Amino acid sequence: MKRIYLDNAASTPVDPQVLDTMNRTFSECYANASSMHSDGTRAKEFLENARSSLASVLNCHPEELYFTSGGTEANNWALKGFAFANRSNGNHIIISAIEHDCVLNTCRWLQQQGFLITVMPVDESGIILPETVKEAITAGTILVSVMHVNNEIGTIQPIADIGRIVHEKNIAFHTDACQSFGKIPLDAANLGADMFSINAHKIYGPKGIGALYIRKGTWIEPLLHGGGQERGLRSTTENIPGVIGFTRAAELCQALQAEEQSRIKDLRELLISRLSDDFDNIYFNSSQEQCIPGIVNFAFIGQEGEAIRLLLMLDEEGISVSAGSACSSNNAASGGSHVLKAIGRNPVEARGAIRVSIGRFNTEKDIEIFCNALTRIMQKFKNVHSF
């Protein structure tokens, strides 16, 4: 049975071109980039050439990019590193109610260290109104962090507008751009963020590699101490094959973005049309306007409690989707999606969503097979509940 993968917001397949590039790097560039011999020098050249290439994609200076183990580390580093480096200027941090768990849990930890955290509400589409940010700022505010695109419902935030408000108050601004990078334009010069986090496994690259952009002049403390790699701010032996794969994946996304996202949008519209036609009791949690093309989050009225069983039955048919965020699924006591609660869903609705996320390698046939399987499964549920 050929499986159909519709969970690209959680992680993407590695593009064959990325894998080919990485395989060559594994065999040709195995030295430590900090070693002084010729092999080490060559590894260092690979590293810095990749950094320059990624900087070109992001329209920033190479020295503003720091490679990490992924988006979680980048987000942790941005918040913790900036908070402790700038504690003498204030102890107040503002985030949104729909941030990724790694941002929410980092801020819970920072609260234990004496920082004050304000969590901003969102509207029913998951949008953070810039005026809400302005109202939350106090004399002690040092940092605002708002994710660019939400990983559960796909909402795109008005990051540039928020950034302008934050910078008018001379406050630093960070955005988690892991779900937006490669899908919508990400330009460091125009984004309005002093720091942003990205990773590779959401853009058809390898897991275990990401980056934090830190604008020149932004002071941040390191999380890792050791040999002084990454210009003294992120010590550990560099993952050269990962960096090369990340860069190649980013280059492919840049080259394919317009055509690819247009095709994915067509698939999304096909999916929404089929779901709307086939099910009278369906409702959508993701906005159909202010949303990236690849994410559709939905549920069925009165059958929210069947979400996990539905997911598992789809899995038995060879179809991979998710019930919200992959990371949130690690917390069995979460009580439902904090994102869905933030947009006004009740506790039952917050536990009952299905997220379909479409990617580069999906086709119309995949959408058709998924919809047909979903119809068969929901008919079984209907028959069971009709007794």
Image (cartoon, rainbow, N blue to C red):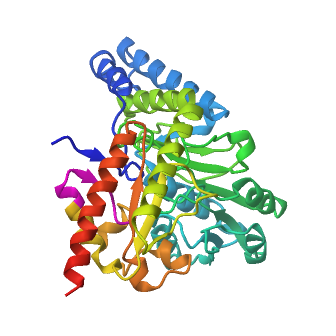
Q: Residue at x 37, y 77 (%)?
A: 351
Q: Quadrant of residue 88?
A: bottom right
Residue 198: image location, x then y, percent: 51, 45
Residue extending furthest right?
A: 168
- In this rendering, the answer to whether 120 lies above or below 153 is below
Residue 309: image location, x then y, percent: 23, 71
Residue 275: image location, x then y, percent: 42, 61
Q: Nearer the viewer, residue 381 or 99?
A: 381
- In this rendering, the answer to whether 349 lies above or below 294 is below
| Residue 319, magenta (yes or no) | yes
Q: Nearer the viewer, residue 278 or 351?
A: 278
Q: Residue at x 68, y 41 (%)?
A: 188
Q: Nearer the viewer, residue 316 or 41?
A: 316
Q: Is residue 16 left or right of residue 99?
A: left
Q: Quadrant of residue 1?
A: top left
Residue 333 visible, this angle: no
| Residue 193, magenta (yes or no) | no
Residue 264: image location, x then y, percent: 49, 42
Q: Residue at x 70, y 71 (%)?
A: 90
**Magenta part of the chain:** 314-324
Quadrant holding the C terminus: bottom left
Q: Residue at x 74, y 53 (%)?
A: 160
- In this rendering, the answer to whether 337 lies above or below 278 is below
Residue extending furthest bottom?
A: 387
Residue extending furthest top?
A: 38
How many numbered markers are drawn? 0
Residue 297 visible, this angle: yes
